[in-house]
Amino acid sequence: MASIVTRVPRRAVCVEAMWSDQGWTECSSGSSEDRVVWCGRMSNMIKLSYNRIWAAAHHLLGGLLEDEFPAVQPRPQRDRMQVFQTLAGFYLKYLQILRRLEEVYDQMVHPQKRRVVRTVLEGVMGRLLELKNEMVELECSEFHYFDDMLQDMKMTPADLEVPIPRYFVWEKTRVLKERERMLAHILAKGGHLEQQEHVCEGAVPVRMSLEEAVRVIQASERARQGRLRAGFMREIRRDEGRGSQLVQSQSTCTLDPDAAAVRIQKVWLGYSQRKRTKRERLEELIFLGMVPPQRPVPSVAERSAHQVEEVRRGVQEQHEAEYQRALLSIKESVKAVEGADIRETLQEQIRQWFIECRDATGKFPDYPSVEDGGSALIFAQKTPDQVAAELAAKEEEKEKKKKAKGKKDKKSGNEKKEKKKDKKGKARRTKEKSEGEEAEKGWKMTPSNFLPSVVQGAKIYREVWQDRDERQNFPQRFDAQLVREEKRLEVEEEIRVQVDELMRQELKNLKLAVDKDKGKKKKAKKTNKKKKKKAKKAGKKKKKKERDLTADRTIESLYEELVLEGLLIRPMNVKLSDYIGEYSYLGTTLRQVDIEPMPSLSDVRQLMALYGILPLGSPTVHEKAPLVRTLLLAGPPGVGKKMLVHALCTETGANLFNLSPANMAGKYPGRIGLQYLLHMVFKVARQLQPSVVWIGDAEKTFYKKIPKMEKDMEPKRLKKDLPKILKSLKPEDRVLVVGTTRRPFEADLKSLCKVYKKVILIPRPDYASRLVLWRDLLCLRGAHLTPSLDLSSLAKVTDGYTQGHLQRAVRSVLTPHRLEQMGRRPLTATEFIPALARQEPVYKEEEETFKTWYSRTPLGKRRLRATKSIDDESDGGKSKGIKAKGKKKKKEGKGKKKKKSAK
């Protein structure tokens, strides 16, 4: 698809622009008929290309579903490596499908097709999260390495990046714009000056005093006067040089014109050839990968392709609006035209069912209740005898339960003894079964909450869209016939409810007239209904309703108060792709040698997409996927923890609440004030979801010992109330609490891990990540990368420096004045050394402390136990026998000591 769009970008833009009008319009160049024909062909090509991508995704999905639901159920697997291979294979294939479906959903224009794609897309996202959870439980680690799998499946590390659906933000564009407008209005109203936070920790701007300002002005004025004086002196020297050259030219004889021309040609040809050779050499080095390429300016084709994407999204909105209008109009027409016929046929069918049941059983049946589905239960492909038998079976079960309750009180002691014997016999049988099943113990795939929706979407694609002829639907508008079929079913359901009420009354009248039923049964039914109502009321009384402390206030007023207090802040416009980091190519190799590798920045980026962005962006994924309420980002300062929090909000359009101890200091004092604050924050977060609650310096909330300097701040205010509020968050509440910490070892680990279930350790960047960071930071700043700048040596020298250190060094060196000199004086690696020397790096000892701290977390402990058990299995039976003998000797020694003491 990319190749099609980039070859003819301007014409594709013309196609989409013409779609956006009410009809095909004449273009500026060429005849209107030719343009319409050509545009129709172009739109058909675009439609076919996305249909092909959709078909390829479903072809791959069909093979996956066959593996997910095999004809013969496999035996439980006991080999951990084999289990991980199967899970990793599923994970990588679902990633490929997700990438294709996301592209199709983003650019497909047909509204009904997009709905089918959306259901499968969300199902695939949820299945990815389930597989990730399975791998975490299996390996007892948040980080996994797929080096071998990538080679087998012919994939690159770039294919491991989790694609973020663009509709998360695109479908909320208007809401986000209104929020921005509201934020700006509230801040202007309150007279607040927003302080822009830096992505990486840097120097905080300080106000300059009057004396310093005067000193700076004087220095700049002296420099200006010096530059003027230097310019005057330069002109004087130039005039003197010209005079001396005139005198010399008059005294010497002139050259022959032919010899002068040859000399000029020689100089010019040499200069041009050297320039050409230098350019070709640079191109060859870039091609070989020995010199980093310059960041290319987007070509005309790329810019036009982006315009095509934007125009197609506008067309999506138009077609969606048409589709929504058609849903209402077609439903009304179906109800007006076919409603009476549907009502009559339903009544006739139900009456016929009455007669058939009367003939088969000798009495009129009981009408199915609303909970059972009403008359829909009658026509669920069942005969009258089957329906009557089901209803009779339900009544019998109810009577048996009543009798069983009465018999319990009358049982004798002998029966109780017999029961005990039966229980003992059952216990023996269960033991025997468990001993027999021990051999069959192993890993089994847990049932999925998302596969049914994926199967349903794939079925709709095969039955409706796979072989559908759409040659006449050039603009890809909705299909009216499909809408009519859907609305006919809805109208039938609505009419069925009305008919059920009428037919229930008619059945009562028939029973009174023909069967002459007694009133005792009715009384019994009434008593049962009364009991049910009483039970429901009792259940309602047991559930305590949460007290609303702000019942008399609107969400708008609460939102305004939180903004003015600085608790609801504006997130920075940072994407997850801006968090630069390279894939770790040695993860599998290190684990094979029993060395636990430090995670790479690419792994951190993937975890943020899986645990944060996908659940927050999609309500269905968040509701059904393994629930993640809290995340803790732990790492040294400058590794980009705050940037990841802001990227979460940018990619999902979430609100950002700042509950850091430093930000909460002095606000809403006292116990009641804190409860009011938390209630207000989480109420607004639930109402305006998705929301991210950020707690910076999370270790301060769980301090082992509060430092004297921070006692006035009350950093442990949230320790008791935060776990209670997290328990109240339901699966449908898209609220994520993210904590960031640079000193996690200062907190009480047990209480910290009770709140933050998922802990992501962010390391300092490795060599590959530093190399990519240097290149991208310099290009973003506007530097020209030449062979004189040895990036490889620079990346090697900066071992231990974080992203924040590198960013500050680039800012300090690449000033506007230095960028102007870039053409005359190329950039070198030595210029960055003084700026780096002024900063304190992250030493290996500090990284080791983070690693040991992580090994004491619940997941880290499980990982250590798992590696020990694997080592014990690899040692074999001999080592186990030796250990057992040693234990026996110890026990014997203890027994002898006890005997001696007794004597």
Image: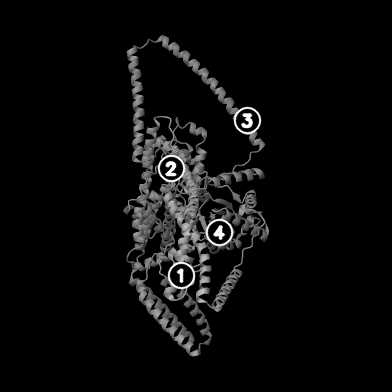
Q: Is residue 51 left or right of residue 327?
A: left
Given contact means CB atoms under 8 Å apart, are the residues at marks 3 and 4 in contact?
no
Mark 3 vs 2, N-terminal side: 3
The circle on residue 181 is none
Residue 90 picture location, percent across and down? 37, 58
Residue 332 picture location, percent across and down? 50, 52
Report, in whole angstroms, how far the alpha carbon at label 3 lies from the one at label 4: 49 Å
Query: What kind of element bears circle 3?
Result: helix
Q: Residue at x 32, y 52 (%)?
A: 151
The residue nearer to you, when weighing 393 against 147, is 393
Mark 3 vs 4, N-terminal side: 3
Instruction: Give amino acid for label 1.
Output: Phe
Circle 1 residue: 354
Mark 1 vs 2, N-terminal side: 1
Query: What kind of element bears circle 4?
Result: helix
Circle 4 residue: 746
Mark 1 vs 4, N-terminal side: 1
Question: Foreground mark, 1 or 4?
Answer: 1
Q: Say above or below: 143 vs 187.
A: below
Q: How many marks?
A: 4
Residue 209 picture location, percent across and down? 65, 38
Given contact means CB atoms under 8 Å apart, are the residues at marks 4 and 2 in contact?
no
Instruction: Give amino acid for label 4.
Output: Glu
